[in-house]
Image (cartoon, rainbow, N blue to C red):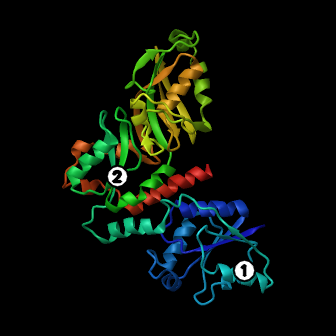
């Protein structure tokens, strides 16, 4: 047995903590977590923790990821380390407290342990201080309108249009969204209100689910029906043949499942050299784009009629369904464009929970908010399911 010890406050648990535990589990098969005592948190960090030490222990135990959770000693920070006799002590990428003392402890005691520095994970948004700003404000101020709105976006609205309309309805300027939807696409758009905007990056960790309609036999410069359409002439493979050869279509669809590199389309909001690709595309320019690593978890075939078929896709954030449609058409040899797109879920946030924009008023939008702490629980569960998959 290899015992790995991790230490920390483990206050508002977020995906950064979960990834730290994941890395620790890759080092050994028995994980011990030492939780900082309340008075030591105040001493080291100059503030109280959001949850008290007893709650922090229970919250970590409930995850079921750690074999043993104990409280540290109030006086001697190394007492529990001596008691546990770990084989490895795994430190967070920015963990500084007591590190020099660990080296001294190893040199001047009978303990034999390695010290491993874990790598950072999404440090741009997995930050406790950002979470505290989002969560403390929402929990402590009853009148504060901080949280997430699940919206059912209609076609012909840009994500920016939706945000602008929300600002008009709520009279709040600090609003953002957790992942854009193309104007012609419909479905779930999650918007953050107030300090909840500090959490939007975490939604990138969740899988997204789409229902897509794809039309065969044509191609488009935008990879969807909004662009310049033209017939595709590659090899002879008619839609009539596809009607009777659904198995071939399913087989090609299954070839897209898994981790892969996907080149973003020119008509996209992705920035290269500080310029949005669609701005360059509208000037008639096409530049080299670096592929993104994406993952398609599942593709469900929903049916084929003439030259149009429907699929349901569960994929990682950053996946372009338009590009999937284009690549699929190339593999089939007949060309294809994305005809309709509806996002039905982001993690376990789903379209059935969403509200139409025209149903919101200044008086009722607060009733539809998901508070940050509840949203974080759902995000943690979604990320947890992902790395246990």
Give the residue drawn at x 34%, y 52%: 176
| Structural crowding at the residue carrying mark 2, measured as other residues with C-alpha within 10 Å and reported as few (<14), some (14–19) or many (≥20) | many
Residue 196 picture location, percent across and down: 36, 59
For the question of whether residue 301 can be seen, the reply is no
Tag 1 secondary structure:
helix
Give the residue drawn at x 22%, y 54%: 170
Q: Quadrant of residue 373?
A: bottom left
Residue 221 picture location, percent across and down: 44, 25
Mark 1 and mark 2 residues within 8 Å of each other at the beta carbon: no
| Structural crowding at the residue carrying mark 1, measured as other residues with C-alpha within 10 Å and reported as few (<14), some (14–19) or many (≥20) | few
Give the residue drawn at x 47%, y 68%: 128
Distance in Å between CA atoms under marks 1 and 2: 45 Å
Q: Is residue 245 above or below residue 267?
A: above
Q: Is residue 172 above or below residue 269?
A: below
Give the residue drawn at x 59%, y 32%: 256
Q: Quadrant of residue 70?
A: bottom right
Residue 110 picture location, percent across and down: 81, 84
Quarter of the image for the N terminus: give it: bottom right
- The mark total stands at 2
Residue 179 picture location, percent across and down: 41, 46
Residue located beneath label 1 in the image? 103
Q: Is residue 301 above or below residue 9?
A: above
Tag 2 secondary structure:
strand
Residue located beneath label 2 in the image? 176
**Drawn side of residue 88 relative to residue 132, left or right:** right
């Amino acid at each position: 047995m290899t015992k790995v010890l991790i230490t920390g406050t483990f206050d508002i648990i977020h995906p950064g903590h979960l990834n730290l535990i994941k890395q620790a589990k890759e080092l050994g098969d028995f994980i011990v977590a030492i939780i900082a005592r309340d008075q030591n948190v105040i001493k080291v960090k100059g503030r109280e923790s959001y949850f008290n030490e007893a709650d922090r222990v229970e919250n970590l135990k409930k995850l079921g990821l750690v074999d043993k959770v104990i409280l540290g000693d109030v006086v001697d920070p190394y007492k529990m380390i001596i008691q546990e006799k770990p084989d490895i002590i795994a430190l967070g990428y920015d963990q500084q407290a007591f590190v020099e003392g660990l080296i001294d402890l190893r040199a001047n005691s009978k303990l034999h342990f390695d010290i491993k520095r874990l790598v950072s994970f999404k440090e741009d948004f997995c930050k406790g201080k950002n979470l505290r700003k989002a969560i403390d404000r929402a929990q402590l101020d009853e009148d504060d309108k901080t949280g997430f709105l699940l919206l059912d976006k209609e076609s012909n609205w840009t994500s920016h249009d939706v945000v602008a309309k929300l600002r008009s309805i709520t009279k709040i300027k600090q609003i953002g969204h957790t992942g854009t939807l193309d104007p012609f696409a419909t479905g779930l758009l999650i918007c953050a209100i107030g300090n909840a905007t500090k959490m939007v990056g975490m939604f990138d960790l969740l899988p997204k689910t789409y229902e897509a309609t794809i039309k065969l036999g044509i191609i488009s410069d935008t990879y969807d029906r909004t662009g310049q359409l033209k017939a595709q002439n590659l090899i002879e493979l008619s839609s009539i043949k596809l009607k009777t050869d659904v198995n071939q279509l399913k087989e090609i669809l299954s070839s897209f499942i898994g981790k892969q590199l996907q080149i973003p389309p020119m008509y996209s909001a992705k920035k290269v050299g500080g310029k949005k690709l669609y701005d360059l595309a509208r000037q008639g320019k096409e530049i080299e784009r670096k592929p993104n690593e994406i993952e398609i978890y599942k593709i469900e075939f929903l049916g084929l009629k003439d030259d149009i078929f429907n699929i349901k896709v569960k994929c990682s954030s950053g996946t372009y369904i338009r590009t999937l449609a284009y690549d699929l058409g190339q593999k089939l040899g007949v060309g294809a464009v994305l005809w309709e797109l509806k996002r039905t879920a982001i993690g376990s946030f789903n379209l059935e929970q969403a509200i139409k924009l025209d149903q919101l008023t200044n008086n009722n939008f607060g009733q539809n908010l998901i508070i940050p702490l509840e949203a974080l629980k759902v995000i943690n569960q979604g990320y947890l399911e992902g790395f246990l998959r």
